């Protein structure tokens, strides 16, 4: 994949933010930082980076969010703020085998979507 100036700007922003951003967020943050880029260019570069497997895209009711990770991982979404944290979860082998037995599928990879609210202790 060719990594041109604009594509590099989008990728650098996602890596530095380490959060999930909408295309609009990316457009606004880049332009606030003096990195002139148009809406269309942001969308085109996000699509190219996602298609190449460099970044992830999460479809939400409020629209798409883009993240800096492309490796297998799970998400924890705060039901109050809507913030999304990337988490690495390893399910026990016996649970995976049980799921395989119940469904007739061989599990090759998985992603969990967990939803909750932050506790006062954290």
Image (spheres, rainbow, N blue to C red):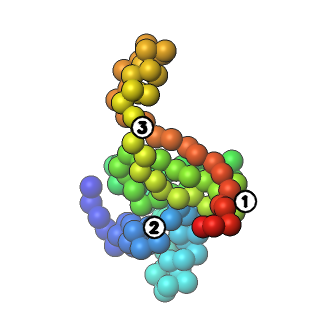
* Image quadrant occupied by the C terminus: bottom right
Q: Measure the C-alpha gap from mark 1 to mark 3.
A: 26 Å
Residue at the bottom extreme? Answer: 34
Q: Which residue is mark 2?
A: 18
Residue holding disc 3: 91
Q: Earlier in the sequence, mark 2 or mark 1?
A: 2
- Residue 2 visible? The answer is yes
Frontmost of labels 2 and 3 is 3
From what the image shows, is residue 68 above or below residue 13? Answer: above
Judged from this view, the residue extending furthest toward the front is 121
Q: Secondary structure at mark 2?
A: loop
Disc with the residue nearer the chain's start (1 vs 3): 1
* Residue that carries the numbered disc 1 in the rendered image: 80
Q: Kindly check if marks 2 and 3 are in contact, taking CB atoms under 8 A apart as contact.
A: no
> What secondary structure is marked by label 1?
loop
Q: Nearer the viewer, residue 101 or 120?
A: 120
Cα–Cα gap, marks 2 and 1: 20 Å
Q: Residue at x 46, y 54 (%)?
A: 87
Q: Report x, y in % for residue 117.
A: 68, 56
Residue at screen point 57% across, 58% down: 84
């Amino acid at each position: 994949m060719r990594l041109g100036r604009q594509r590099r700007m989008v990728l650098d922003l996602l890596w530095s933010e380490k959060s999930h951003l909408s295309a609009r967020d990316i457009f606004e943050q880049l332009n606030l930082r003096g990195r002139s880029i148009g809406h269309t260019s942001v969308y085109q570069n996000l699509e190219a980076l996602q298609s190449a497997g460099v970044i992830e895209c999460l479809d939400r009711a409020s629209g798409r969010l883009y993240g800096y990770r492309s490796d297998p991982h799970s998400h924890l979404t705060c039901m109050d703020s809507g913030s999304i944290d990337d988490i690495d979860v390893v399910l026990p082998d016996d649970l995976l085998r049980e799921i395989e037995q119940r469904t007739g599928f061989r599990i090759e990879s998985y992603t969990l979507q967990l939803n909750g609210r932050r506790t006062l202790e954290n």
